[in-house]
Amino acid sequence: MPVFFRSRAGRQCLLLVALGVALWAIGAMLEFGDRLAAFVSAFDSYGADKLVLALAVGGTMSFVYSVLRIADLRREMELRARAEARADWTATHDHLTKLPNRYAFERKVVRKAPADPDAISEDWERNVTIFCVDLDGFKKVNDLIGHNGGDALLIEVSKRICAIGRADCVYRFGGDEFIIVATGLSEQHEERFARLLIQAVTRPVYIDGSAVEVGASVGYDRWAQDSEPLEHAAHRSDLAMYEAKSRGPNHYLAFQSSMRDKVALRASLEAKLRVAIQKKSILPFYQPLIDLKTSNVCGFEALARWTDDDGANISPLVFIAIAEETGLITALFEDLLAQACRDALAWDDHLTLSFNVSPVQMEDRLLTTRIFRALAATGLPAHRLEIEITENALIQDPASAAAILEELHRAGVQIALDDFGTGYSSLAQLARYRFDKIKIDRSFIATYRDDERQEKIVRAMLGLGRSLNIQTTAEGIEEQRQLSHLIQLGCDIGQGYLFGRPMPAEETLSFLANRDLALAAG
Ligand code: C2E
Ligand code: CA
Ligand code: CA
């Protein structure tokens, strides 16, 4: 029914028309026309004909006026209805991809089911699976090709997803996250569908003539129609997607309850980490760095150690990652660095302190200020501090990374490129920045004696260091034969369990004394 007739004015208009027709019918039945004609001729001398004519003209004019006003009103109402529909569309759709958004998902799908069984279409009676797709590496691509390019990529990706799923069942949830509501898929089909989604997203997209690629992580789960709101299933598919993402790009996973346990464990670890940082119970341990020419200790690398209240040792790989994600890294870094600088003052003046800086810390505008503050507060000379960074720290924002490194260099702080060889742009980084040291990742040292190609790579890395006049450190030396070979190849510094494991500050002094004694004894 047109908008106008659904309104109060429209209903009144219909009522009046009906009333008019009824009156006319009654008039016709009672032969009102004949009576009127008789009346007019009887009172002709009093001007009754003119009165009837005036009433007829007036009535016609009123009728025309009403029709015009009704037409206006109708137009007005249609405009308003269209504006409302537009506002509703804007609120429930993503402007870029034109897909419905999270709000639409909540409103149209979640609220409909299962509380309102009438609203469940036939489709919903079959099983429903929620797929969550998140792009891998989108941010990097966006930085690389600019926002317009990123937008074009998102539009193309959304079209491809719609081509697989039903277009009205694809939602864009966040920046690069999509939700697909699929019905009637068997378990095998769910898997195939997830694979198809990854294939569709990862095919190269051509933007301004060049091919751009992103990955996709997919998680999915079924909705238990009778016992939960749909958003619960969406949440589970989200958890599965995160788990898939943690396994690297282009993975898909169905939800499992262990994923929820993992999230709960992470939340509890995060809470414990906050307390541990507050109580300063995370401490730096120190692993010796050995000058391979003289066999003397030339410094220590500080490595964070955390034993929780239950006596369990939590790996820095775990808690540093949580600290990075939650922003706790800054407080942790400041405490550990200040403590490490104080501990380093107890060593001989020529020993350096190597300290790890996380990639996310390169976004901290106050990073250099924090480092200088720690040096000033403890009195450790800048040249005794060496900052270890990985290539990942350099690629995010190369210009600001260069500025940070330059400022540290100017102050006399040394810079080491950590985990060398594990990133993807090592050579580019070496050309761009001035490093004092490169640390060859321990994965190369662990296997290189058994693997000819690895040996060639290590040899090449050492040669690279020599020709660029940068010192090289080999990490993860565990065996004498590895050491002998590295010495033979001209590696400058060694680190690994063969020389010493990370130890508490108190043990560093006895370690140094024992090593001196051992060297003196030959
Ligand atoms: P990394 O900087 O590459 O540190 C070297 C890691 O290799 C340390 O592990 C060390 O214990 C281990 N390692 C040393 N020698 C050997 C060996 O001979 N064999 C083997 N298999 N491993 C050896 P750890 O202490 O578990 O630290 C792991 C990573 O956690 C570090 O890798 C570093 O990236 C990060 N990390 C540790 N402490 C800190 C910190 O205070 N701040 C930041 N940002 N990251 C830290
Ligand atoms: Ca390191
Ligand atoms: Ca390393």
Image (cartoon, helix red, strand yellow):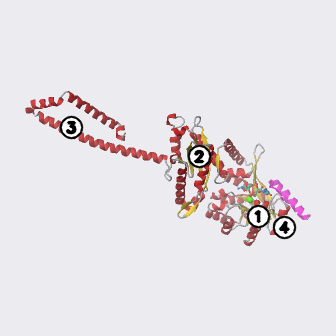
Label 4: which secondary element: loop
Q: What residue did someone put label 1 on?
A: 454
**Residue 61 on image: x %, y %:** 21, 40
Question: Residue at label 3?
Answer: 59
Tell me the distance, in whole angstroms, between the alpha carbons under discs 3 and 2.
Answer: 65 Å
The residues tagged by marks 4 and 1 sit, at their Cα atoms, a distance apart of: 26 Å
The residue depicted at 53 percent of the width and 64 percent of the height is 209
Q: Is residue 516 magenta?
A: yes
Give left or right: position of 401 versus 11.
right
Q: Tell me the distance, in whole angstroms, between the alpha carbons under discs 2 and 4.
A: 60 Å
Point out which mark residue 294 bears.
4
**Closer to us: mark 3 or mark 2?**
2
Instruction: Specify whether 80 is left or right of 115.
Output: left
Q: Quadrant of residue 494?
A: bottom right
* Marks 3 and 2 close (CB-CB < 8 Å): no
**Pointer 2 residue Cβ closer than 8 Å to ligand 1:** no
Check if mark 2's residue and mark 4's residue have beta carbons within 8 Å: no
